Image (cartoon, rainbow, N blue to C red):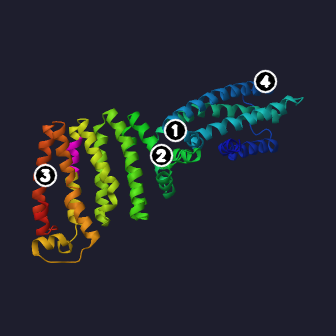
Amino acid sequence: MKEIFKRLIDLLDYRFFIGIALVWFLTMVIPGFIPDVLNLKYLIAEKDIIAILLTIITSLFGILIAFILLSFGIFRDKFGRVALSFLIKERNLKLLINLLLSVSLHLLIAYIIINNSKIITEFSITIAYISIYFFIISLFLLFPISFNTLSSPDSLKNVEDCISNISRTDIDNLAYGRGLSDIESVEKIDENSISIAQRYGVSLIRSDDKLGFLLLLKKLNDKIISVIDENPERHYIGNVYSIYTDTLHAFINELILQKDEKSLKTIWIIISLNHKHFADKKIQLLYLEELDFFIKNYIDIIIINQLDNVTKFGLNQIKDILKYHYSNSLPLQSRISMLMDVFEQKRIDHDVDTELQWDKISRDIPYYFTSILRKSIEVKNVNIFTSTLYQLNYLSFEVIRNDSIGEYQKAFII
C-alpha cells in the first residue's frame, strides 16, 4: 500500500497547482483584469457555467481512467511486469493527469466560492472566464497528449533509457540468480534492466519495428562492450557474454518466426564487432568462450532453418573476424613454442596465454567453417557447402598476402 501511494505521489507535479494558486492570487488582487466581453452576467449565472464545466471535466476523468488502462496494456506488452514503473515515468501521462487534476480543483473551488456568493461581482465573472479558458486549454491538449502517450512505448528514447540503466549489479543478479525459485530472486531477475531490454526487443520484433530493434541491438552491444572495458576480468566477461548470448538467442527465435533475414544478418555484424573490439584491445580470446558457443549454435540454427542468405553473410563475417585477429591480436611466431619446435627445432619457454591465443586464431575460429561444412552436408545443402569452400579458398590467398602473419604461421594455417 505504501509503495502504491508513493507511486501516485510521484505522478503529481506541484507546478500545476502552484500555477492555479497564482491565478487565484492575481484574481483576488485584480478582480476585473478580464473584461466581460461575452456579457456573461446577462446570459447565465457564473455558478451554472462552472457547474457545466465541472460536469464535463468529471466525464473526462472517466475517459482518462479508460485511457490509463489502455496505456498500461500497451506498456505491459512492451515491458512486462515492470510496465507500471515505465508508465508512471511517462511525461505525457503525467502532464495529462496533472492538467485535469489542477483544472478540476480550480473548478471545484470556484463553484463553492461563487455558489456561496449573494451577488455578481467582477471577481466571480473573472473566475468564470478563467474557468472557461482552463477548460478550453484542457480540451485542446487532451487529444494530442493522449496520442503521444499511446505512441510513447514505441519511442526510440525508450530504447536508450532501457539500455542506459544496465549496470554491473544487473549482470551479477542475472548471473547468480539463475536457478533460484524464491519469489524475491525471480522478481529481481524480472525487473533487471537486461531482462527488460530483452522483452522490449522481442516486442519490437513482433511489431515489425525493424528500426527500433536494430537501434536497441546496437545500443545494447555498445553497453556490453563498455561494461567489459570497465571490468576486464575473465570470470566477469564470461558472465556478461553468458547473459548477453541468452538475450541474443531470444531475439533470434523471434526473428526466425518473423522471417527477418536482415536483422538476422545484423546478429553476425554484432558478433564481428565484438571480435573486432577484442582484437583492437588485444584481449585474450579465451574470455570469449560463451560467444564461441553461441556462434556454433547460431550456425546450426540458420542452416537448419534454410536461411542461406544469412549463412553466406556469416561466412563473410567469419572471414573478416579472422582478418581482424591476423592484423591486430596474432602472437609473434617466435613466441609460439609449437611452431619454433616444428620448424626450427628450437626449445623456447611455453607461455600459456600466447599459446591459447594462437590456438583460438589458428584452430577455433577457422573451425566455424568446418561446422558450416558439416552441417551443410548433414542437411544436403550444396549451395552453402560450395560457398564455404569458396570463402576458404579466398581466405587462403588473404593469409598468403598478409604481412602480419609469419611464414611458419602461414604454413600452419593453410
Is tag 3's residue or tag 2's residue first in the polypeptide sequence?
2
> For the point 47% across and 55% down, which residue is it?
171
Residue 36: in magenta span = no
Q: Quadrant of the N terminus?
A: top right
State the CA–CA distance, disc 2 to disc 4. 54 Å
> For the point 33% across and 53% down, which residue is it?
291
Given this view, does label 2 or label 4 mark the residue nearer the observer? 2
Tag 2 and tag 1, C-beta contact below 8 Å: yes
Q: Secondary structure at mark 1?
A: helix
Corner quadrant of residue 72? top right
Residue indicated by mark 1 = 80
Q: Residues within 10 Å of mark 3 (few under 14, many from 20)?
A: some
Residue indicated by mark 3 = 392
Residue indicated by mark 2 = 195
Residue 314: in magenta span = yes
* Residue range corresponding to the magenta coloring: 310-317
